[in-house]
Amino acid sequence: MEMVYHDNAYDPFINTFPHKDGLLDLSRVIWSRSVGSLASDGAFLKSVVHVNDDVYYLKLSNYDSYRGVFGHESVNECIACRLGGILGFSVASGILREAVAVIDGIAYQAHVFISKSFKAIDSRASFEAFYLSHRESPRESPLDFSIRNGWKTDILSMFVFDYLIINRDRHGGNIEVLKNGGIRLSPLFDNGLSFVCTCRDDADIGAFDSILDRKVNNFIGEQSLEKNLRFIDTKLCFHALKSEHRKLLFQDIGGILSQLHMDKIWEIVTVRWKNVEKFRVAR
């Protein structure tokens, strides 16, 4: 399988911003803060940029005033995006670029994940808001609501994908309902709080247990990635994970993450694959 990670769909965005010393110059972009739910301090910075008739979402990693931009959540977004494409899950596309970003008047060099909007903003709603306004009764769970609306396969596939990447943050706003052309679920997005996102150095990464179940912030199902696999009662359609996919997954990432870091992410995916492969039918 050949993967090309520079999508021409992003050329209008890339060409809109000048390049400075090989970096994408995003110094005029305004960033907004969302508090990091897995961090004791700091915030994850996001921005929405309009280019012609298209909307692009930009995401940086964690930020605080004394460390600047740190962590690797934006890189996780890229790796999760690639893994979804390799295995055939419905995951929002995106690209990773090194850029200059100005935050609180200071210029930082950082990696930004750029994702093109898959639908107009006014044609979408958060899953949580849609569920609260359309459920049959307060006793109808988000999972039962999804099944009633015909989204069972989408949700079970989400359980598999989130288990593979150890996604900690699939809250009710990190799933969307698209309302143009019929009511359906959006591709999976906001996958940055995954893999070893709680680790801040190689010592933490080396000690990280790749198979250990963890409490997560899920709106649908259980607060456990492992327990959510128990809801899967049918075969799902996705590709097999192969050893040659490692090269595709980390293409151009070697200069960003340490070898130990990449080894750990691959270990996470491969050891967890053994627990989800039984649900797969060939795609």
Image (cartoon, rainbow, N blue to C red):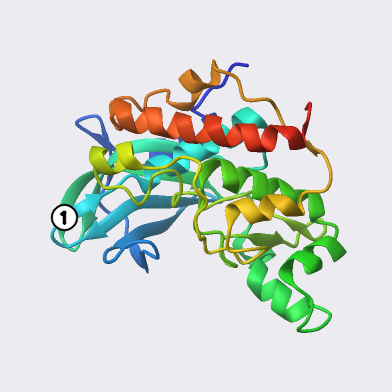
Q: Position of residue 261 (x, y in %)?
A: 33, 33
| Nearer to me, 273 or 175 | 273
x, y percent for residue 171: 56, 65
Q: Residue at x 69, y 32 (%)?
A: 277
Q: In the displayed structure, does residue 10 sit left or right of residue 274?
A: left
Q: Which SS class for mark 1? A: loop
Classed neighbour count for the residue bearing mark 1: other residues with Cα under 10 Å, few (<14), some (14–19), many (≥20): few
**Quarter-wise, where is residue 121 in the image?**
bottom right
Which quarter of the picture shows residue 100?
top left
The amino acid pointed to by label 1 is: Arg
Q: Quadrant of the N terminus?
A: top right
Tell me the residue at 66%/44% (across/down).
160
Which quarter of the figure has residue 220? bottom right
Residue 29 appears anywhere in the view? yes
Q: Using residue 240 as the reference point, say whether residue 17 is left or right of it.
A: left
Reply above or below: 146 against 21: below
The count of marks equals 1
Could you tell me if residue 119 is visible in this image?
no
Q: Position of residue 242 (x, y in %)?
A: 60, 19
Residue displayed at 42% across by 42% down: 209
Residue at image mark 1: 67
